[in-house]
Image (cartoon, rainbow, N blue to C red):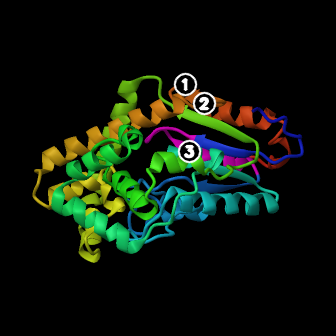
Amino acid sequence: MVHAWPLSQQAVIFLMGPTASGKTAMAARIQDEFESELVSVDAAQVYRGMDIGTAKPDSAFLARYPHHLIDIRDPDEPYSSAGFCGDAAGLVDSIIGRNNLPVLVGGTLFYFSALENGLSALPSTDAATRMRVRDEIERQGLESVYDRLARIDPGTARRLAPTDSQRIQRAVEIYRLTGIPPSRLAAQTRRQGLNRPIMKIALFTGDRKVLHKRVETRFETMIGQGLVAEVESLLSKLDNPFLLPSMRCAGYRQVVQYLRGDTDYSQMVQNAVAATRQLAKRQLTWLRNQSNVVWFDTEKAGVSDSILAYLKAHPLTMNRRKTTDRHFTL
């Protein structure tokens, strides 16, 4: 159903795109031009101490362009899509209450979908059950646990990659807690999503080779900035770090494998770049399946000005424009 939103209704901006597409810089430009607040939509940037490998904006940038939902968890603390939806929905209400424009920016695209459409009312994580499932994965192997899930809930198993340990673990937890296959439970119970007008902007790079080169260059930069030392420091502070979702993020997982001696340095770099490229591909595939998305090619001259012109001309954002212009180059 398409809403005929009244012009007085405050819009919410979704600024989306694959990794290394320039979302952060574009968000800064939007904040320069509009009375707005930025909300990070990134499942990895929520973690304190995970700075280099998540391409988290540095402290000087964040001082000028503050982001909600950055550095809100330690790497061994869980953070879920349900937690994000609760946090983000509350922030959207507060930002609009301050008469500002909410700009949600990031690459964890499932979070955008969950916020817009709502999530199934699945049971909260139970620490004891979670630990039992983790132990089973460690003792029996992920493949064995995945095969068992496929027998219990073929629909969920088809939706998950056999290597997606975090979601496989969660699906098994849900079944253990409820006795109901997660796909059936999800169909039975769904919470309402964000009931506000959403303007979806997607950044992309038309030339895939350019995106691949950006990914490679960015990871090389991360290595130069001290990513390996960052991961070493994290591992020294965490209990059972190899089971944590935070350490399975693209880039971190490969450095962890290198530090464990599973790969050499050159293979680690190759694996990390390949994993990040695959992530970008999945992100683009997901975006292409979404509705009402306005696309902007970041390789075209003046793309940031085009995005700003689009926002300024839209009736749901015109009343949030700043009276003075400042510029941040994309």
The quarter of the picture where residue 318 lies is top right
For the question of whether residue 210 can be seen, the reply is yes
Residue density around tag 3, few if under 14, some if 14–19, many if 20 or more, within 10 Å? few
The residue that label 2 is drawn on is 303
Quadrant including the N terminus: top right
Amino acid type, callout 3: Ala
Q: Are the residues flagged by discs 1 and 2 in contact, CB closer than 8 Å? A: yes
Residue 114 among those drawn in magenta: no
Q: Would residue 270 appear left or right of 60 to someone viewing this image?
A: left
Q: Which residue is mark 1?
A: 300
Which disc number belongs to residue 155?
A: none
Q: Quadrant of the C terminus?
A: top right
Residue range of the region highlighted in magenta in the rendering: 16-34
Q: Which residue is mark 3?
A: 187
Residue type beneath disc 2: Val
Find the residue positioned furthest to the front.
179
In the image, residue 29 lies in the stretch drawn in magenta: yes
Please state the horizontal and vertical placement of residue 281, each as a whole percent of the image: 39, 32
